[in-house]
Amino acid sequence: MTLYIFASAVLRCGFFLAVAAAFVFLAGLLSPAAGGAQRSPLARIGAPCITALAGLLTLDALILFHAFAAQDFIVEYVAQYSDSTLPAAYRITAFWAGQPGSLLFWAWAVSLSGALFVLLPAYKKLGTRTQTGFCLFFTGITAFFLFLLADWNNPFELLDFVPEDGRGLNPLLQNPGMVLHPPLLFLGYAGFVVPGCLALAQSAGSGRAGEPKTEEAYWGDTARPFILAAWSLLTAGIVLGAWWAYMELGWGGYWAWDPVENASLLPWLISSAYLHTSVIGRKRGKLRRTNVFLMCLTTVSAFFAAYLVRSGAVQSLHAFSDEGVGLPLLIFTFVFLYLAGAAALCTTGKDARPLEDLSSKEGLLLFVAWLLSAVSAVILIATLWPVIINALITLSAHLPAFVAERLPQTPMGLEASFYNRACLPLLALPALLLLVCPGRKWKLRPGSSGFTRPRLFYAVLAAAVGLGLTLRFAGIQQPVALAAAACAVAGAAGILLHLSSGPRPASLLAAHGTHIGLLLMTLGVALSGPYQQKYTLTLGRGETGKAGQYRVTVRELYEGESRIGADGRPGYRFVEAELRVTSGNGTPLGTLAPQRRLYAKFEQQSFAEAVTLFGPGDELYAVLLGIDERTMKASLSFNVNPLVNWIWFGGILMCVFPVVGFVMKRPAGRSAGEGAPEGDEGDVAEMEETRENTVPA
Amino acid sequence: MAKRSGKGLYAAALLLFLGGAGYLVFSGISESSVYFLNVSEALSLPGDKLHSARLFGTVRQDGLTRLDAGTGVRFQLEDKDNAGKTLWVEYEGPVPDTFKAGAEVIVEGGIQGEKAFRAVTLMTKCPSKYQKENRI
């Protein structure tokens, strides 16, 4: 018990330390001496301060892990989300099953990323003003987390009695997907804090006229490993969340356009837009303001996502309750947005050269950024649509009648079909662009085709048209699905052919690998969504039914019990249908055994354990709805999902390849931004144009 | 930032793109807008306005009937804040795992000349993260 009182005290001490440090750094940043060439004392205390905060949060995180491992049910949070029958792995992962624990995990991840950054040589090479600015913004964000944790969301709140057992972890969360999905999302969100603070800090430093200028690395280069790692982790978190929904919720879908899902997509889309404009920024020295704004927007969108999830502002499939964190998160979002706007305005863009033609690689990269930003704006507006309509209804009471009668009078929202109608065509466009972009030149010259390998481009284009026609004749009628699938396959083949023409820099390999992953995912989504087939069968022992091209026979119906641990405590009871699956002509394809489970702590509800018959083409997905005890017939739901596994395979590539970009060693003598312009092999004139990779600070 | 000639092209392309995206959004809004209502709001509307709606509420214990082997359910949807206001809901299809009396649910469908709301989608709120109840 003393341990948990101590842990609460650590949160409060950490909060006061972070606030004090933030004020000191603010004073330092405002002092005229901050931009001096000599190292100020502030620059020396920044790293220890951020490391100390990380140490305090690590201590508290370890204490909470201990509380779950030791099953200290005196801690309210532990009693709420675990019990004595919970398997050891889930006992640990219950850490992030509720709001206080997940907030602590997020704060811990943020603090560790900051501590890692200030220990790196890259941080030590920054100017004093940028270091001070970084420490100010970073300790400010840490203070905000600790403010929430110390007061409204303290995971170390104690009960005034010790329960005999805990309430248990919801069975839906007892799934490998849920072990990793939340922490990966939080690690992704956290990873964008360092780049966001660094962008703000360098921009804040660059706007002061008349100060001595020192040369320091461009923030986009310094923070690039953090940005790529965060993007990979966020992608992994989103893909794992989709896989968990597919396997565990038992409805056969992986994406429902729920506000919680949309919330995680916003930072991903904005950071993806940044990754495209950052190529122009790093390689061509352009769009610096845009890059600062997009990175800060990425950082703040993670906090806004948390606001959507935890405030109850919008109705969602997920159960929310505003425990007081909604308003602080919203205020924080607006403050950070203001800072992002100010930082973008402060960033010097005078030296930037004009953009190349719209159809050059530079122009197309910018177009992709527009596209991704537009999709994120559409999703944001649609998610908040019920809030907007409610605000209009409230407003209409105070407006003249002729205006009010034109405004909606009843709460309204948008169905999932809106997102499919508005977003899927936009999200299919990258597949089309990836036919063109990989071989496009940075600079177009009169008389040139604009492609590094024109014949390859025309071959890829012809392949896309041919594939489209083939799919059309095969029965794929929906234009968006047809175009996306054809472009995805042809585009992936085109990128592979580009890669096969010789050795490539790691950054190009990373980009191309990630794009192949995206194209495979596009292929999977394009066909598994609109062309999913659903069947419901009621079968007794020995009876056979048909689900699409599959024939399913019930071999046996079972009931049983699963026991946990050496003492054989009851975990759950289950009923199971053993199914034999054959093709239409009787060829055996496999055996499936979907279950329904009744968990010891959740006897009022039965939980489906969906099973799949894996296939690179169609996948058969089976759920046992129930067994009628009178007739001894099983009700079974089947989905035939075409190409669904390409979503997961593409997702894996998208998570792995960005890491290649910063793990693989660069050629000696080149800094991050000094490689040959991507895709323009042999274009010496363009290599000479590569900017020096420094900015005034 | 762009060349004088290029700036115009970028601006025209941006306008064209925003026009296309705007068309998708406005056509989507006009065709996919549905009423988002709690039970008391739904009861206050005439039936002909409820041909397509998403309702929020809790499952009442009284009258909860499951069809054979989990292939559907009939229940009363109760207003979360006003316990007296209820609406009958009929749903045929796989019932979510976490559906039970007292659960918060979202139903999509409509009333078409009948008294009961025929749901084509039945969703229970995910009992996962961020939920706080006095459960001990």
Image (cartoon, rainbow, N blue to C red):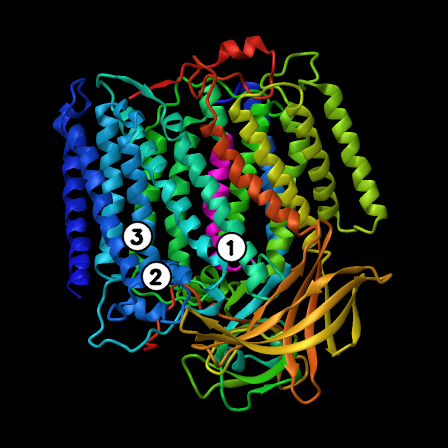
* Quadrant hosting residue A628: bottom right
| First along the sequence among labels 3 and 1 | 1
> Mark 1: few, some, or many residues within 10 Å (few <14, many ≥20)?
many
Dot 2 alpha-carbon crowd within 10 angstroms: few under 14, some 14 to 19, many 20 or more: many
SS for dot 2? helix
Badge number at residue A555: none
User: Could you tell me how far apart the alpha carbons at marks 3 and 1 are, in whole angstroms?
Assistant: 28 Å
Q: Which residues are magenta?
A: A257-276
Asked whether, in this view, residue A288 is left or right of residue A484, the answer is left
Which residue in the protein does label 2 denote? A99
- Residue that mark 3 sits on: A331
Name the residue type under label 1: Gly
Assess disc 3: are there few (<14), some (14-19) or many (≥20) residues with their C-alpha within 10 Å of its C-alpha. Answer: few
Residue B127 placement: quadrant:
bottom left
Q: Are marks 2 and 3 in contact (CB under 8 Å)?
A: no
Looking at the rendered structure, the kind of residue marked 3 is Ile
